[in-house]
Image (cartoon, rainbow, N blue to C red):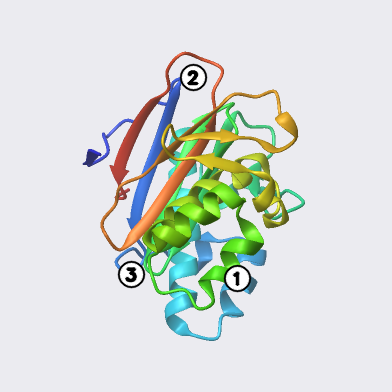
Amino acid sequence: MNWQNPPKELELGANDVHVWQVDLDVTAFPIELLSTDEQSRANRFKFEQHRQRFIAGRGFLRSLLARYLNTDPAILEFDYGSHGKPFLKDSSIQFNLAHSENLALFAVSVDRAIGIDIEYIRTIDQLDALVQRFFLPSEARTIQAQPELFFQYWTCKEAFLKATGTGLSKLKELEIDRTQLKTIPIEARPQQWQLQEIAINDQFASAIAVECNCPTLSFSYFLGSL
């Protein structure tokens, strides 16, 4: 996977998907860039590191979307779906974000539902119970045989559920076929979807799901710097 520095001019075509990787510990934005609600959320964090990461993530998101829309990042207004997915009013730009530890990912498209997830790979207590609760029998057998695949399956599922705006209660209703990187979606939704794992390093697992009604989507992967 070719992570590259972003171009000076951002062009997002109908079949383009842009993925941005950002280290929240080396990215800084003033809290004044955030909305009053976002500032209140930031100030509720107990630990300063978590507060600064939230500010960095929201600041980067606003600055990124503002570049695509050619507007002031401070005036962007987010609405939220029933499960907390943010979106922009009256805009064709679709986006999603995820973070784990210091890394954040941002995905952007035009008029395509999109979801992204990232997880820091770590030891999971009571893994068997978690797998039985959230995974189908075929998936559970694979993960029990290869526990290191847990986060690959998890991020694939969560990316799809975030794209559809569905809660985690539906995890067990979604089957992931990692051999072909496809989904068997909830309630046989009519949309076609492209699911792709994202290679970062051996410490993180990540995946993206994008609504796809065209032969090919064009993915670009950028290292965050605005």
Say if 222 sits above or below 83 in the image.
above
Name the N-terminal-most of marks 3 and 2: 2
Q: Quadrant of residue 94?
A: top right
Q: In the rendered image, which residue does mark 3 sit on?
A: 25
Out of 101 and 20, give the one closest to the viewer: 101
Residue at (42, 22) in percent of width and height: 217
Does the residue at mark 3 contact the one at mark 2 (Cβ under 8 Å)? no
The residue where tag 2 is placed is 14
Q: Position of residue 189 (x, y in %)?
A: 71, 29
Q: CA distance from mark 3 to mark 1?
A: 33 Å
Residue at 51% x, 45% y is: 72
Residue for badge 1 = 129
Label 3 secondary element: loop
**Residue 60 visible in rendering:** yes
Pick the front one: 68 or 217: 217
Residue 148, percent from left and from top: 37, 61
- Rendered location of residue 198, percent (x, y): 36, 44
Disc 2 residue type (three-letter): Ala
Is 217 left, or right, of 89 in this rendering? left
| Residue 70 visible, this angle | no
User: What is the crowding at mark 3: few (fewer than 14 residues within 10 Å), some, or many (at least 20)?
Assistant: some
